[in-house]
Image (cartoon, rainbow, N blue to C red):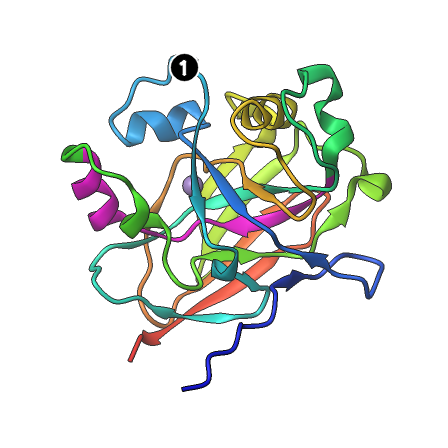
């Protein structure tokens, strides 16, 4: 038996052929008040909390992702994604944006039935969240070209119908705060991605659906849902 490592996941970067090698994927839970309410939680400004996904869950724009196994309630979550370019730990909010390489549109695809069952039983979210091909990622735009994002529309459509519509200004914890908090838990590293949470309006998709995530200043992300995984 010959076992070989898969190639590293390399995300596309606007304006260059040099990609962004993905190291780790961190995700923020409940970072928009309206979404916290729709999930049955009080959006008081509790410190942000994080979960993580394998780097190999990241797939590029244009991918058709199979409908995963073990779920009957596969949900979209449109998110702003932060790409980390510089290592550090215990970073202050004032210094946090120096560690950001750029930004992209993303989807935190979720087996909602498994996530909610885990939540109600006080178990980890892994089987609801960390699923093959569950972290679609759009083109990364370097902050050196577009600046940092603290406002601007974020929108998701399914088959052309608007399902999520909010503004990055609605983030309970903006990017600098998220990076600062995360660096208090881990040494953040170049290649890390942070999915910053989703606005209200999450819902299910089925095979054949096409999702489009749009964020002002970024390239849209288009992802289709394919047939159930074989
Ligand atoms: Mn999410």
Left or right of 198, for residue 151? right
The residue furthest left is 121
Is the residue marked by circle 1 packed among few (<14), some (14-19), or many (20+) residues within 10 Å? Answer: few
The residue furthest front is 1
Residue 200 locus on image (x, y percent): 40, 35
Q: Which type of secondary structure does the marked residue at label 1 adopt? A: loop
Query: Looking at the picture, does residue 131 appear above or below residue 64?
Result: above
Residue 83 locus on image (x, y percent): 66, 44
Residue 54 locus on image (x, y percent): 46, 54
Left or right of 170, for residue 138? right
Task: Point out the stretch of residues depicted in magenta.
Answer: 101-119
Magenta-colored stretch includes residue 105: yes
Q: Nearer the viewer, residue 113 or 6?
A: 6
Disc 1: residue Cβ within 8 A of ligand 1's nearest atom: no
The residue furthest bottom is 1
> In the image, what residue occupies the spot 74% across and 42% down?
85
Image quadrant of ligand 1 equals top left
Figure label count: 1
Query: Looking at the picture, does residue 205 appear above or below residue 187?
Result: below
**Which residue position holds label 1?**
46
> In the image, what residue occupies the spot 38% across and 13% down?
44
Residue 207 locus on image (x, y percent): 33, 71
**Where's the C terminus, which quadrant?**
bottom left
Left or right of 203, for residue 156? right
């Amino acid at each position: 038996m010959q076992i070989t490592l898969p190639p590293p996941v390399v995300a596309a970067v606007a304006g260059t052929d040099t990609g962004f090698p993905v190291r780790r994927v961190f995700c923020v839970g409940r970072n928009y008040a309206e979404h916290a309410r729709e999930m049955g939680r009080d959006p008081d400004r509790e410190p942000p909390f994080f979960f993580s996904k394998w780097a190999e869950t990241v797939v590029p724009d244009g991918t058709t992702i199979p409908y995963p196994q073990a779920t009957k309630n596969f949900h979209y979550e449109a998110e702003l994604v932060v790409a980390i370019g510089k290592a550090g730990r215990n970073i202050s909010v004032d210094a946090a944006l120096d560690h950001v390489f750029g930004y992209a549109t993303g989807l935190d695809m979720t087996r909602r039935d498994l996530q909610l069952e885990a939540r109600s039983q006080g178990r980890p979210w892994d089987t609801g969240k960390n699923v093959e091909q569950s972290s679609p990622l759009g083109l990364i735009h370097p902050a050196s070209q577009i600046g940092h994002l603290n406002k601007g529309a974020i929108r998701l459509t399914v088959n052309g119908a608007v399902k999520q519509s909010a503004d990055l200004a609605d983030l309970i914890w903006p990017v600098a705060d998220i990076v600062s908090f995360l660096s208090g838990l881990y040494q953040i590293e170049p290649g890390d991605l942070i999915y910053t949470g989703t606005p209200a309006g999450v819902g299910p998709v089925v095979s054949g659906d096409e999702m489009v995530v749009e964020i002002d200043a970024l390239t849209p992300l288009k992802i289709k849902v394919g047939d159930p995984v074989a």
